[in-house]
Image (cartoon, rainbow, N blue to C red):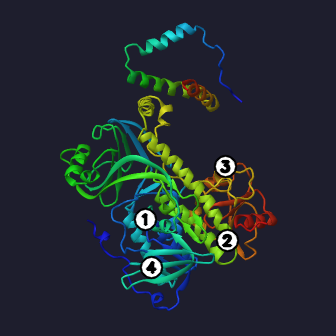
């Protein structure tokens, strides 16, 4: 059974985070939401594993409380 | 208006039953002479079960209503003697195109492989279908079948008993009482039968309105299903275009929830909307306009003692996917052979509970698909709209997102996986596993599907089986085929196996299958498929 990797996996986390912020520079709430939606769809398709995606969705929804 | 709407096809005629001092008891009475009630009546009459159909009206439906008829219902209508006339008159199509704004997003072909008698879909106005069904009833009557279509008969009260059902009927000549051993309710979404028996019908209401317009015009759009998300002529909403016979075009425009429904139906408001879509100079004539909302719901059980519910009376879905009338025909197909066996005393009444379990399974599949399509077409929140728009945006460039675009997943027959009637299975192609509707294939100069149905059959491919068999009163005939020179048959029924034996139900559904013939196994499977297994 596959499971979501929640251990550190990105080589340079600060650099990645900066790129995420950059992507949303000058964008309003609506545009940001659209960008997020497209990003989720692209990454989900790339991952392709429904179990992993479901696990990620559960954690994300729980964290949002 | 087309005059077919206005001509009484089965005007009220006084029945001898009305002159009896004691109520007459009939084996089967059907309430509703719509497509489902008439189909059930024809199926019963073809199997020599006397049947009475009651309807308070005497005409075909007003307006085109259900227009998309899928391959499986056409196969069922073939068995009922109406398939050819439907396909000859109907507009055949299999390709759909989806647009976002004014640019195409993607296209799909619903029947990409060859080797089937019937097309993926035809479009035909419901009133033609009803006219053909009534003509078929008349032809059966001429052959001497006991099928009685009573217009102007309104059922006003129903009494449900252990051995029968009592019906109080109002007619232009006054009331009378009729009894039925079995009652089929095919009286539509607002089913008075359901209401009179006090049975709940709960589900999800979708807060949206759709303008539906049939226009007559000469136009050169291709014979395809076209669906628009957010088109320039209906911003922020959706639109759907279908071609029907007689140069009639069906246009569906999503309007949203907060509208004045009566005002929107007026020609002075409808025509500008249509001109925005078809062009200022387009010449067209309005044939029919309606506004609809919809619900996705089903009855908890389709069987209530001796009352059996079928079609919209039992379940409702959104129109996206053409799963309404189409699934009603599957109800009839599933129900009638079971009822015939029960009436003949060859199967226990509990066989009818499998009508409930199999068709509620089918209804759930349809409700799931149509709910998902509706949630995509009408997002419930800003966040779900952002996701939907993201899919549409990405789909223009990236294939993965095309598969998520949901403008309605179009009707396909359901497979009764896990049905109590399913028997043995073995290593043969998945598409023809027990519970599946028979896959058609070319057969000699004709089609396999035309050789199936009407009774239990052994479909034997390159395996020796007896010509006929009888299992406690149930006759089983054999259909012996060779795979040589029949590649579609081999692919759909054999796969890598050298030979196969399929036990087919009277509704052309696979009951069980083996790679060798074993009489004891066949007997066991027949008993399982008829609810007689101990």
Tell me the distance, in whole angstroms, between the alpha carbons under discs 1 and 2.
34 Å
Label 2–label 3 contact, CB within 8 A: no
Please identify, in this view, whether the residue under mark 2 or under mark 3 is nearer the observer.
2
Disc 2 versus disc 3: distance between alpha carbons? 31 Å
Circles 1 and 2 on the same chain: yes
On the question of residue B500 being in view, the answer is no
Taking the spot 78% from the left edge, 65% from the top edge, the residue there is B524
Q: In terms of image quadrants, where is residue B351? A: bottom right
Alpha-carbon distance for marks 4 and 2? 27 Å
On the rendered image, what quadrant is the C terminus of chain B found in? bottom right
Q: Nearer the viewer, mark 1 or mark 2?
A: 2
Residue A42: percent from the left, percent from the top?
Answer: 51, 25
Tell me which label, 4 or 3, sits earlier in the chain: 4
- Ranked by sequence position, the earlier of labels 2 and 3 is 2
Q: Earlier in the sequence, mark 1 or mark 2?
A: 1
Q: Is residue A60 visible?
A: yes
Residue B77 placement (x, y as % from top left): 50, 66
User: How far apart are the alpha carbons under marks 4 and 3?
Assistant: 49 Å
Name which of mark 1 and mark 4 comes first in the sequence.
1
Q: Which mark is residue B430?
A: 3
Give me the residue at 37% from left, 59% from top.
Answer: B65
Residue B169 image label: 4
**Closer mark to the observer between disc 4 and disc 2:** 4
Chain of residue at mark 4:
B
According to the picture, the residue beneath numbered tag 1 turns out to be B86
Measured along the vertical axis of the image, is residue B192 above or below residue B107? below
SS for callout 4: strand
Q: Label 2 belongs to which residue?
A: B349
Q: Secondary structure at mark 2?
A: loop
Depth-wise, is mark 1 or mark 4 nearer the camera?
A: 4
- Say which residue appears at 65% left-offset and 73% top-offset: B341
> Is label 1 in a helix, a strand or a loop?
helix
């Amino acid at each position: 059974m596959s499971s979501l990797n929640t251990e550190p996996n990105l080589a340079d986390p600060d650099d990645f985070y900066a790129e995420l912020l950059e992507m949303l520079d000058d964008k309003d709430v609506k545009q940001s939401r659209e960008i997020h939606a497209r990003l989720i769809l692209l990454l989900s398709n790339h991952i392709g594993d429904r179990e992993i995606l479901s696990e990620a969705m559960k954690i994300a929804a729980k964290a949002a409380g | 208006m087309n005059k077919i709407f206005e001509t009484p096809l089965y005007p009220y005629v006084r029945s001898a039953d009305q002159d009896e001092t004691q109520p007459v008891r009939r084996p089967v009475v059907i309430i509703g002479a719509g497509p489902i009630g008439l189909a059930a009546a024809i199926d019963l009459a073809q199997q020599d079960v006397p049947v009475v159909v009651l309807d308070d009206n005497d005409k075909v439906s007003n307006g085109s209503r259900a227009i998309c008829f899928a391959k499986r219902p056409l196969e069922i209508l073939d068995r009922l003697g109406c398939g050819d006339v439907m396909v000859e008159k109907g507009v055949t199509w299999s390709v759909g195109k989806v647009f976002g704004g004014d640019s195409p997003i993607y296209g799909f072909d619903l029947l990409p492989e060859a080797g089937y008698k019937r097309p993926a879909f035809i479009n035909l106005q419901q009133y033609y279908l009803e006219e053909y069904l009534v003509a078929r009833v008349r032809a059966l009557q001429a052959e001497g079948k006991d099928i009685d279509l009573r217009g102007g008969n309104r059922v006003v009260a129903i009494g449900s008993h252990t051995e029968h059902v009592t019906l109080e009927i109002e007619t232009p000549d006054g009331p009378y009482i009729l009894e039925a051993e079995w009652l089929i309710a095919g009286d539509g979404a607002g089913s008075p039968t359901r209401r009179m028996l006090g049975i709940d019908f709960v589900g999800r209401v979708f807060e949206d309105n759709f303008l539906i317009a049939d226009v007559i015009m000469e136009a050169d759009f291709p014979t395809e299903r076209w669906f628009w998300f957010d088109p320039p002529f209906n911003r922020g909403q959706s639109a759907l275009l279908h071609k029907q016979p007689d140069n009639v075009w069906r246009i569906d425009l999503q309007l949203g929830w907060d509208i004045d429904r009566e005002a929107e139906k007026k020609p002075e408001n409808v025509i500008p909307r249509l001109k925005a879509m078809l062009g200022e100079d387009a010449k067209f004539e309005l044939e029919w306009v309606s506004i609809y909302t919809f619900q996705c719901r089903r009855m908890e059980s389709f069987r209530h003692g001796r009352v059996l519910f079928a079609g919209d009376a039992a379940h409702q879905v959104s129109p996206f996917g053409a799963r309404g009338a189409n699934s009603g025909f599957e109800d009839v197909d599933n129900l009638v052979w079971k009822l015939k066996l029960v009436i003949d005393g060859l199967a226990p009444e509990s066989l009818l509970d499998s009508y409930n379990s199999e068709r509620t399974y089918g209804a759930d599949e349809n409700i799931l698909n149509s709910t998902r399509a509706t949630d995509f077409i009408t997002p419930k929140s800003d966040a779900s709209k952002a996701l939907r728009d993201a899919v549409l945006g990405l789909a223009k460039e990236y294939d993965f997102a095309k598969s998520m675009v949901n403008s309605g997943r179009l009707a396909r027959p359901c497979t009764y996986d896990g049905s109590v009637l399913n028997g043995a299975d073995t290593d043969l192609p998945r598409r023809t596993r027990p519970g599946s509707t028979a896959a058609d294939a070319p057969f000699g100069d004709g089609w396999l599907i035309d050789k199936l149905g009407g009774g239990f059959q052994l479909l034997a491919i390159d395996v020796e089986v007896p010509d006929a068999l009888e299992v406690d009163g149930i006759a089983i005939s054999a259909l012996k085929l060779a795979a040589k020179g029949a590649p579609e048959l081999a692919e759909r029924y054999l796969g890598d196996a050298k030979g196969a034996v399929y036990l087919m139900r009277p509704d052309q559904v696979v009951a069980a299958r083996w790679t060798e013939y074993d009489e004891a196994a066949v007997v066991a499977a027949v008993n399982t498929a008829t609810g007689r297994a101990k």
